[in-house]
Amino acid sequence: MFNYMYYVVHYELCAAFFMLILLVVSAMKRNFGDYQSKIYRIYLVVTLVDLFLDVITCYTVHYYKLVPLWLNYILNTIFLTLQLTIPTLFTVYLHVNTSDFRYITKKILWAAFVSPIIGFIMLLTNGWTSLIFYFDENGYQHGTLHWFLYANAIYCAIVAIISMCASSQYMKKKQRYFLITIMVVAMLPTIIQFLLPNYMLSGVGTALSVFMIYMMNENVTGYIDQTTGALNREALVFRMAESRNKRMLEQFFVIALDNFKIINEMYSMDGGNEIMRALVDDLQDYYSESAVFRFGGDIFVVVIEERTEGAKELDRIRKIISKKRYVNDEIVELSACVGLVHSIHHNDKELFHAMEYSISNAKHMGKGQFFELDESGVQDMLKRTAIEQALLSAVEASSFEVHYQPIYDIELGKFRSMEALARLQVDGYGYVSPEEFIPIAESNGTIMAIGLLVLEETCQFIRQYNLKKMGIDYIEVNLSIVQCMQESIYQDIMVVLDRYNIPPSMINLEITESAAAYSDDLLIRNMARISLTDITFSLDDYGSGYSNVNYLVDLPFSIVKIDKYLIWAAMKKVTSRRVLENMIKMFKSIDLKVVAEGIEDMEMLDMVRNLGVDFIQGYFFSKPVSKERIIERLNQDYINKILGENT
């Protein structure tokens, strides 16, 4: 008994004080950032209580004649219950760790608790059965099934090993080796104690395993966003992969804070970070640390099982977001756009795109808006993704397909110019219109590269066929609003023209009415500087937007292109025709050339010719075609044939 007392007091008591210090240090460092920390915390506290209780029961057993028998039974039952619980908690912790930030599956959960439940029942009935321990005239004695305590530890180790093997594909090599080392440190002393009962090492082994887990918690910061305490994108990738592996259906609420830049400006970056941490804490308090991820910047993701009702969760998330928070004793109220994505509609590769797509649509709708990407919207998203990929591929290959549509000069009776029109072929969708891919190119930043590629292809075309000698005075090239607002646009254009030795007068830049509506000082300066080089400007799609004549006064346009819908309306109503007629007279009175777009038949051509337009563009003469085909149509025979067939 002396040896027993010696080992317990000197080893287990030292281990208990070491664990107590570890608990204090962990609390001071707030080392509970990862979502496994709740299990780790319970494991640490239970082990700490178990070690102290081991020392107490050692004394009560040694002096059992001085301690009431019922108290001895209670103390030993509690102590041995903790002995059963510790391996189970250890197994659960290892499973959660190997599963890389996942919920504990029901099978593993049940497997981990089967053995200790049996042991707990045996301890509750031990007063009658004496299967685990009993007291006689010689004091404390092991029962016939006392070995079950050790068997429970071995059983839990086997369950942990199975869990690790099942999840090995999601584990990093260092993580796998570290977990195996923890298991050896935890289980080897228990085996030694079973074989050599006088060497009480199980408490020391458990304390060492807790310390190693503490060190692992230090290492898992690679999965935690250090600014907010939320899990990061890498953790979200692991979660999505295992959800797919386990066929778990989930819904992803994507939260993008509104006007957070203003908050950073008002309260500094530190204040902004404090607000985001407070928001993450509130989300974690309700949804758990395993459900909240920082997607990037001021965007967060909350992952919830699909069986929960989305509308209720949205309402709950909005209440959490709008909760009053304090920075520097000032009240700060947040609002956010929210996107909702369902994993059932996407594979892992699509999920990130889906989340970006949903929150982008929500933000586009306005402040505090909600957008759910349901099954009907998935096809739109997939098409957008395919378009984005096609745009990136075109930029990477430094080539962009360009078609050309001729423009007929009424006075000269021939094709005098043409418009260069970008064309994008997308796998699975064929050609998509510029109305679809230009806004996407503007949003993903490829528009500048694409605009210059189209200009370069046009310059190559002019040089290759010497279009000036073929009667073409200039080619119209579209300029997007993003290009118009770039400081470098003048230099970028001139570099391309110089590379192919193209006279500036051979290029006419088309700016849409929506782009001209900005009338920004930078736009005015850019156009004024470019116009000094003999490059001319056209106002495209006049009548499709605000139709403000100020564009034509403030900006150096030489050509106005009337939108096809105004032409078509004039074919149907007399009043629309009178409006169009007066519009054309106004343009010509300020020395602007007028192009009628969308001309599809001889009747329309006759109408706009009688109204006094200068140029005709539309399917009547030709739809946009490749450069090889447009060259075939730059002859008088082609024009005479078209006019003759429709006379």
Image (cartoon, grey):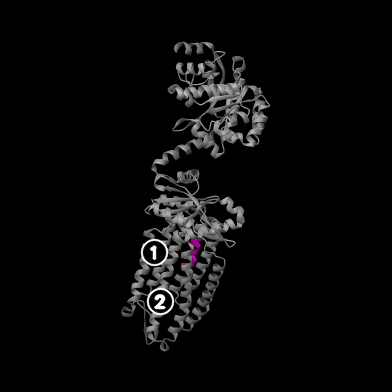
Type of the residue with mark 1: Ala
Q: Which quarter of the picture shows residue 381?
A: top left
Return the residue found at the far bottom: 66
Q: Which range of residues does the magenta coloring cover?
A: 177-186
* Mark in the foreground, 2 or 1: 2
Q: Which residue is labeled 1 in the image?
A: 112
Residue 293, image x, y percentages: 49, 54
Q: Is residue 29 one of those drawn in magenta?
A: no
**Crowd class of label 2 (few under 14; some 14 to 19; many from 20; radius 10 Å):** some
Q: Which quarter of the picture shows residue 328?
A: bottom right
Q: Is residue 210 above or below residue 127?
A: above
**Crowd class of label 1 (few under 14; some 14 to 19; many from 20; radius 10 Å):** many
Residue 44, image x, y percentages: 49, 69
Q: Pointer 2 and pointer 1: residues touching (CB < 8 Å)? A: no
Q: Is residue 422 above or below residue 58?
A: above
Q: Which residue is labeled 2 in the image?
A: 78
Type of the residue with mark 2: Ile
